Image (cartoon, rainbow, N blue to C red):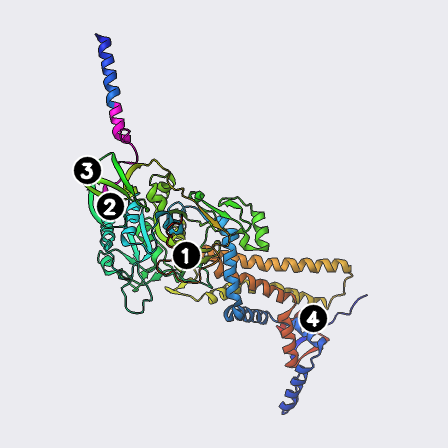
Amino acid sequence: MGREPAAFVFGQRMTAPQGQPTKRMSGAIARARRPNRDDMECLRLGVPYWFMVAVLVTISTFQIWMNPFGFSDLVQRYSQDVSDLLITGPYFYGTEGRDNVSVAIVDENTLHTLNSPWPWKYGDHARVLDALLQYKPKAVVVDFLFVDSRPDETLKDLVAEIGRYRKAGVPIYFEGGIDLPYGENPLRPELAKTGVPVIDPSIPINSGVARQYNATGRCFNQNPDAQGNCPSLALRVYRDLYGKKYPPAPVNDMMELVWGTRTAPENHWITRSDASGDSHSCFEDMNLLRRWYLAFFNTSVVKSPCPYTAEFPVDGMLLQPDDKDVVKMATNRVIFYGGALQGAQDRVYTPVNDLLPGVFVHAMAMDNLITFRGHPFQNAISLGGKPVDGNLVQIVATIPVILILSLIHWRSVRRKRLKLCEPARERSVTFEYFFDKAVEKVWHYLAFGLALGVGLLLTRSAGLSVANWVEVVFVSVELAAMLLVGLPDSIWGYLHHVAGGQLQAAPGPALDAAEERVT
Amino acid sequence: MKGIGICFGAALIAVSSSAIASTEDCSTTSGDVVLSARTPEVDLFDAPTGKKVMTMEQGKFPACTPISGRAPNFMLQVNVNGGKYWVPPYMVKYRFSGKLPAVCRNLAMGSNDQKAGATRGLGEGCPKKGAN
């Protein structure tokens, strides 16, 4: 069994007689409507490398830029969530930040224990702040807004407390109200007059989940930098406390939060109960396999209601100030003083806990900054000092993968063409089947590996988070599948056929010479 | 003679140490008592939820002051310089005859994946009279 060597000329245009453009056009239309399958099959083997690359770049650009049905965005963010929950959070996120940040919380139990209904008087807050000051914390951030000018004779106690902090050399920060429609002061003037730093508490919510953190915010009483920007809450506190030791990297657009999952050991006083009402510790060990197995069916099973950041209730601190856990959590740490109150509308979803009080988002941002020593993950890279569109970055990141995959595929197409000139070899059908399947698998893993390498390179060199390059991986595998089924070659074959490309037996020249003419 | 001297010295030490001990733990004062100031300054308030009326330095705050009252928010009523004031519990070292409430929380699954679909109004969530 054998086949006579044949040589083909690919890409020669079928020439129509001069002066007959209409006939040429009608011929093209006829071929477009009823293409010759055999012709196309042969013509597709002559696909040039540049065409293959162009088709794949077009597809990837469409997929990434157009964000069809919001699919790309959802995939990106969901991948980030899964990474936080199953990879980064449990195994790769350090505890340096966790050991330096705490949350002092006012919750429903606090109100009940202290028999103090909400809202509290300024004097009540002053007492809590004064109790915190006794532990010599690194800094205290007050996550309550004091906007409304309600009459309260204890306001001066809070003003005096700010003076005590200044005297003790412990930085204290207040937050300013935003989006106040009637020109209200962001902070009561009596408090603002003390010169206490007022910071923007805005939290960006991405599809309902706190995944990112602002780099800049409203200035209030801060002095803006040369670009007229003021740092966001966590960045401002970090800059003041750690800026000299570990200067913060410029954040091009936003911080990408990494949510830890290993609850602070100080939170042993918190338990969690499952759907059946059974009580569990917040520290139940779960090995990697079990975690992944459970998450495969339902990610919420591996989420924990216990916060990552060390937390203590202010009632515990006020009543038992020498409690060793309180002492540990409040001494020499950055303390966020906030509330977890029903109906206060300050709760946000996190990728690893579901709902948490908003104060934990600020604490987590601070934790990220400390853990990464001022170089948090970001959602954008900058070029010439200006942030570059994330989609553009991903498209550019896809190009090396496209170039490599296209080259490999193009060479295999080329080999197929050469085989047309060679006698066919006898091969077992079983061998062919398994060989093809193996190639298929290896091919996809190759695409996956290449894209993952590019992504990790972006993380390492530019600090981009997984959400900002995971699309490269998905698109690369998708493009690999398209190459496997020969999509660009088929398009080439069809277009070439419609344009009048003809498969011709070339009697004389060898195949290589013919190829040269074609490509 | 030498033995009498040793015995006298031992007795003196015993008496003085018990005197110091009684000052520190106020063993001579019965009931709930503020042992001493805990913070460098102690704020005195006119009511359990009232305003600050005086601030005393740590050294001037009287030791072993009986607690004459305990507010629901755990402010402690003490008699200082002839006046009745309230002090926050964290500002003083105190001794209670009763037990302090345990600090613990249980977070139920599902409790933190639902938001209240309403804004907290004035007075909501307040402990009701007669309810524990």
User: Which residue, given by chain and number where applicable, does mark 2 sit on?
Assistant: A168
Judging from the image, mark 3 belongs to the subunit labelled B
Does residue A105 appear in the picture of this structure? no
Marks 3/4: CA–CA distance: 109 Å
- Estimate how packed mark 1 is, as few (under 14), some (14 to 19) or many (20 or more) residues with alpha carbons within 10 Å: some
| Quadrant in the picture for the N terminus of chain A | bottom right
Q: Are marks 3 and 4 on the same chain?
A: no
Q: Residues within 10 Å of mark 4 (few under 14, many from 20)?
A: some
Question: What residue did someone put label 1 on?
Answer: A342
Of the residues under marks 1 and 2, which one precedes in the sequence? 2
Identity of the amino acid at label 1? Answer: Gln
The vertical placement of A232 against A136, above or below, is below
At which x and y percent is residue A312?
A: 38, 46
Q: Residue B67, image x and y in percent?
A: 27, 38
Frontmost of labels 2 and 4 is 2
Please indicate whether residue B131 sits to the left or right of residue A25 in the image: left
Q: Is residue A310 left or right of residue A437?
A: left
The answer to which quarter of the image holds residue B44 is top left
